[in-house]
Image (cartoon, grey):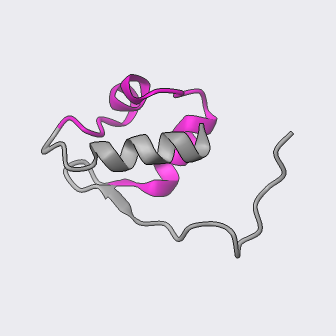
């Protein structure tokens, strides 16, 4: 079981998807809620469906949190 990270280990929240205003914390929450791949995140949060500039960042977050 994963223990909660110390606040010192957590990344500060930041805007990942500019087009849809999706924050890092929202992506992490969606992953923890069952969105385990990029397609699931696209469907749930619409990330990567606008200008596509966040796609690489989304994949990095999936690797870190998934």
Q: Quadrant of residue 6?
A: bottom right
Q: Is residue 19 magenta?
A: no
Magenta segment, prevailing SS (helix, strand or loop): helix
Tell me the quarter of the image containing the N terminus.
top right
The segment highlighted magenta reads 22-49
Identify the residue at image location x=61%, y=32%. 33
Asked if residue 63 lies left or right of residue 45, the reply is: right
Query: Up-down: is 48 above or below 61?
Result: above
| 12 lies above or below 56 | below
Q: Number of numbered discs present?
A: 0
Which of the two residues, 55 or 25, is positioned nearer the viewer here?
55
Q: State left or right for residue 14 relative to residue 53.
A: right
Q: Is residue 39 magenta?
A: yes
* Between 14 and 63, the one nearer to me in the picture: 63
Which residue shows up at 52% across the image and 28% down it?
35
- As drawn, the residue found furthest toward the left would be 51
């Amino acid at each position: 079981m994963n223990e909660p990270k110390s606040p010192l280990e957590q990344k500060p929240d930041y805007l990942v998807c500019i087009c849809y205003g999706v924050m890092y914390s929202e992506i992490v929450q969606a992953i923890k809620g069952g969105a385990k791949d990029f397609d699931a995140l696209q469907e749930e949060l619409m990330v990567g469906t606008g200008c596509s500039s966040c796609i690489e960042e989304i994949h990095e977050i999936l690797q870190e949190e998934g």
